[in-house]
Amino acid sequence: MPLALHATVVDASTCRPIRNAAVDIWHCDAGGVYSGFGAGTSNRTFLRGMQRTNANGLAVLKTIYPGWYQGRTVHIHVKVHIGGNVVHTGQLYFPDTLTDKVYRRSPYKARPGRTTRNSNDFVFANGGKNSLLSMKSDGAGGYVASIAMGVVRA
């Protein structure tokens, strides 16, 4: 399922957009597999990427709706880098009702049995509601996810 992630980076003190911040993401595929992890996968880089923000603080990353793995709710890992320093590390989350809808389609439906939802995820419980993505249809069968992240410059 195509997903365009629109991540806006702003200064947490002034709410002004930060130009040229690097937004770095990674997540698992529809089968729950991460690239770069496990035996023989160190050279794989699928579903990992980085984009720089524009003058409005916006980075657009084109990816797919993430899969899930046992014990965790659906999420995307994110880091924000400014001037070579990591100024934010976190996870981005999806509304469970939308995930349920997406997971009724192929290839996601090949893995039934997702039991961890936002409400019972141990990481989401520690402020994940603040990292819940705003979602809308892209009009072409995929989704656009949006979030603004306030960061403190290092």
Image (cartoon, helix red, strand yellow):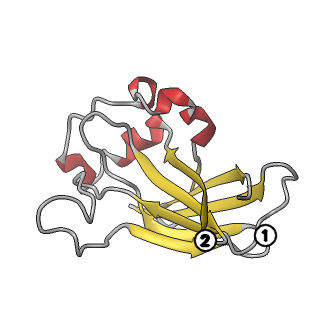
> x, y (%) of residue 43?
23, 75
Q: Residues within 10 Å of mark 2 (few under 14, many from 20)?
A: few
Q: Which mark is residue 29?
A: none
In the rendered image, which quarter contains the C terminus?
bottom right
In the rendered image, which quarter contains the N terminus?
bottom left
Answer whether labels 1 and 2 touch (C-beta < 8 Å). Answer: no
Mark count: 2
Q: Quadrant of residue 81?
A: bottom right
Asked whether 31 or 122 is in front, the reply is 122
Q: Is residue 38 left or right of residue 75?
A: left
Q: Residue at x 26, y 65 (%)?
A: 36
Q: Is residue 139 visible?
A: no
- Amino acid type at mark 1: Asn
> x, y (%) of residue 110?
17, 49
Asked whether 111 or 89 is in front, the reply is 89
Residue receiving disc 1: 56
Residue receiving disc 2: 84
- Amino acid type at mark 2: Gly
Nearest to N terminus: mark 1 or mark 2 = 1
